[in-house]
Image (cartoon, rainbow, N blue to C red):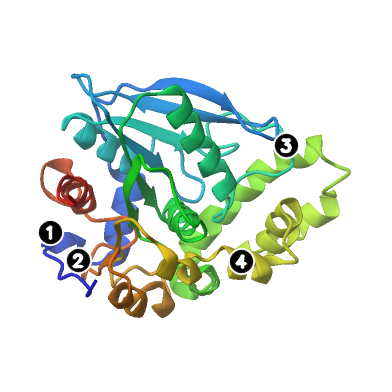
């Protein structure tokens, strides 16, 4: 499909991408979402915690939500979408990736941008144990890359899966990593690194034979983290190999169900190759919208319902 025109009218104060990003990540709150937790066992014996919220009426429609780097099911970008969809007759399940639910996971490995085997396990669990006829997925940032990779690396997907929405997607993981290491993004970089390393310190105590204190203390940047831990724990040669194998960009031409990507042009996390214009023009199932403003998952809009949340609902209600 051709690239879509965006109709996002940004509130004046939030035209600065850093302001919209910081406000949305640190200040925004969403009230009125009651979540119920379900723990599922993964094929390798590890677990995932799924946080459910429900429509007031019985429904056969389900939205799966996937969070971003160091996120969880309680982030406002998750609960904001959940609230809107619950109010429009969808049940919503917000997935906490391994180690992100407040409980350290059991294995040395954790989660990463390309861990589609865990998403596949969630989808199979839902299809085998629930009675939803329509399933949709919305991924934010890392979660957006994951779901687009999931779609594009498979010859077919379950018939219940009807469409996906991906927001602020680092389609090129290597390009996005380079952006995060620029001076402009130093505060974000340092915040991500601090959270990741603090989580890894706990894991190192349990798996000291697989990760030494020397290795842990050598992590000074996100590049270091991916070289020292992400690659080693998940079977990649190094960080660069991880970025190459897991970037969703290469999988976009193979997507066979409707997929909407919304990437703001002033998102400081995204490199130029994170805007897949060519791929969208050549694939009738791929819809690309590039608002001028919005920062990284910061599409502030009226009544505390974000633009990307409205567009996600609009997209799934009008794809047929």
Mark 4 or mark 2, whichever is nearer to me: 4
Residue shown at the point (58%, 50%) measured from the top left: 115
Where is residue 215? Give x, y as percent.
81, 56
What label sits on residue 15 in the rendered view?
A: 2
Q: Which residue is mark 3?
A: 107
Tell me how far mark 3 sits from mark 4, CA to CA: 22 Å
Mark 3 vs mark 1: in front? 3
Q: Is residue 79 above or below residue 19?
A: above
First in sequence: mark 1 vs mark 4? 1
Q: Can you tell which of label 3 and label 2 is closer to the viewer? A: 3
Do the residues under discs 3 and 4 have CB atoms within 8 angstroms?
no
Of the pair 81 and 228, the residue shown nearer to us:
81
For mark 1, what is the residue? 11
Residue 67 vs 87, above or below: the answer is below
Name which of mark 3 and mark 1 comes first in the sequence. Answer: 1
Residue labelled with disc 4: 245
> In the rendered structure, are the residues bearing label 3 and label 1 in contact, judged by CB atoms less than 8 Å apart?
no
Separation of disc 4 and disc 2 at Cα? 34 Å
Residue 269 visible in the displayed image:
no
State if disc 1 and disc 2 touch (CB < 8 Å). Answer: yes
Asked if the residue under mark 4 is in contact with the one under mark 1, i.e. CB atoms within 8 Å, the reply is: no
Could you tell me residue 166's position as x and y percent? 35, 55
Q: Residue furthest right?
A: 209
């Amino acid at each position: 499909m051709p690239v879509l025109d965006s109709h996002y009218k940004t509130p004046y104060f939030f035209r600065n991408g850093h302001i919209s990003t910081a406000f949305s990540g640190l200040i925004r709150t969403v009230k009125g979402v009651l979540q119920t937790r379900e723990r599922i066992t993964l094929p390798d014996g590890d677990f995932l915690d799924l946080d459910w919220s429900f429509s007031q009426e019985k429904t056969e429609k389900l939205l799966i939500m996937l969070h971003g780097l160091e996120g969880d099911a309680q982030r406002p970008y998750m609960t904001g979408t959940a609230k809107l969809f619950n109010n429009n007759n969808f049940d919503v399940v917000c997935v906490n990736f391994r180690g992100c639910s407040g409980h350290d996971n059991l294995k040395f490995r954790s989660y990463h941008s390309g861990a589609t085997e865990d998403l596949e396990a969630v989808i199979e669990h839902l299809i085998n144990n629930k009675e939803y006829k329509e399933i949709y997925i919305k991924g934010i940032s890392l979660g957006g890359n994951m779901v687009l990779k999931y779609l594009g690396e498979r010859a077919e997907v379950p018939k219940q899966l009807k469409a996906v929405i991906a927001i602020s997607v680092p389609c090129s993981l290597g390009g996005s990593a380079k952006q995060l290491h620029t001076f402009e993004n130093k505060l974000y970089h340092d915040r991500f690194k601090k959270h990741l390393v603090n989580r890894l310190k706990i894991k190192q105590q349990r798996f000291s034979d697989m990760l030494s204190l020397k290795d842990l203390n050598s992590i000074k940047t996100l590049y270091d983290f991916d070289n020292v831990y992400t690659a080693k724990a998940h079977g990649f040669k190094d960080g660069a190999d991880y970025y190459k194998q897991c970037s969703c960009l290469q999988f976009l031409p193979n997507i066979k169900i409707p997929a909407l990507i919304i990437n703001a042009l002033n998102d400081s996390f995204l490199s130029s190759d994170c805007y897949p214009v060519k791929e969208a023009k050549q694939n009738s199932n791929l819809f690309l919208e590039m608002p001028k403003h919005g920062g990284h998952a910061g599409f502030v809009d009226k009544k505390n319902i974000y633009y990307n949340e409205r567009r996600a609902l609009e997209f799934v209600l009008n794809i047929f």
